[in-house]
Image: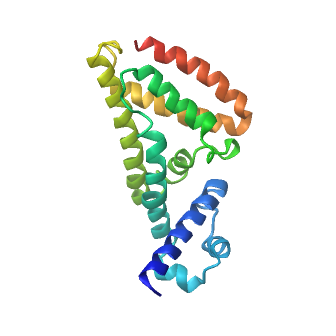
Amino acid sequence: MSSKKAAATRLNILQKAFELVYQNGYRTTSVDEIIATTQVTKGAFFYHFKNKDEMGLAMINEVMQPGMRKSLIEALPNNGNPVEEIYNMIESLLLKDPFFIIKYGCPAINMVEEMASYNEAFNKALSQLVIQWEEAITNTLENGKAIGKINSNTNSKEAAQYIISGYGGIRNLGKIHGKPSYISYLSQFKNYLNTLE
């Protein structure tokens, strides 16, 4: 197998596995389902990955992290209005991102809930994603404090954790109550952000 074809096959496996895991969960998605969806042979799958967990870690590191980076980290441009930037990021994640499907929630939040306490290697990989997001929000708030847009008494790291936990919670509630719960959440989220000014 040429290295170009091998790389394309590997990426195809990871992308299809990501779609299946997003819809069905990691532990309930079998290697056989991934193979059937990708239409590769079992030998091709195991050529690229020793086992399902190795594939799962690659999926987090090579598909989820780069894909989520744009929505979670690069969405905070630090242009001088931190409250607006953070609100717009969360609003975009909830209402505008074409990939996220309300009934399935957020792939990163789902993986954290399903795998972080189950598998130490998954915990470490998922922690990297959450830490990067937390740092981006913290930095946005700190920059806001430096220019007088955020109250100097605000603990930026704690606020970032609160924002992320609120997002995770509403993603899960949205699985039950649908889009109206996002609208209600965003209204109250805006009120919370205004208390940081």
Q: Is residue 182 visible?
A: yes
Nearer to me, 17 or 50: 17
Q: Is residue 90 left or right of residue 61?
A: right
Task: Give the residue drawn at x 72%, y 35%.
Answer: 178
Quarter residue 43 falls in: bottom right
Q: Position of residue 75 (x, y in %)?
A: 45, 36
* Quarter of the figure with residue 162: top left
Q: In this image, 127 relative to 90: left or right? A: left
Q: Is residue 37 above or below residue 104?
A: below
Q: Is residue 185 above or below residue 65?
A: above
Left/right of residue 75 with respect to residue 80 in the rendered view = right
Q: Which x, y percent locates residue 112?
A: 50, 48
Q: Is residue 57 above or below residue 31?
A: above
Task: Give the answer, above or below, for where 181 lies relative to 8.
Answer: above
Res. 50 visible in picture: no
Question: Quarter of the image containing the C terminus?
Answer: top left
Residue at the location (54% across, 33% down)?
A: 167
User: Percent position (x, y) of residue 19?
Assistant: 62, 59
Residue 165: percent from left, percent from top: 49, 33
- Residue at x 60%, y 32% (from the top left corner): 170
Of residues 37 and 109, the one nearer the viewer is: 37
24 left or right of 112 in image: right
The residue that appears at 55% across and 51% down in the rendered structure is: 114
Give the image's coloring scheme: rainbow
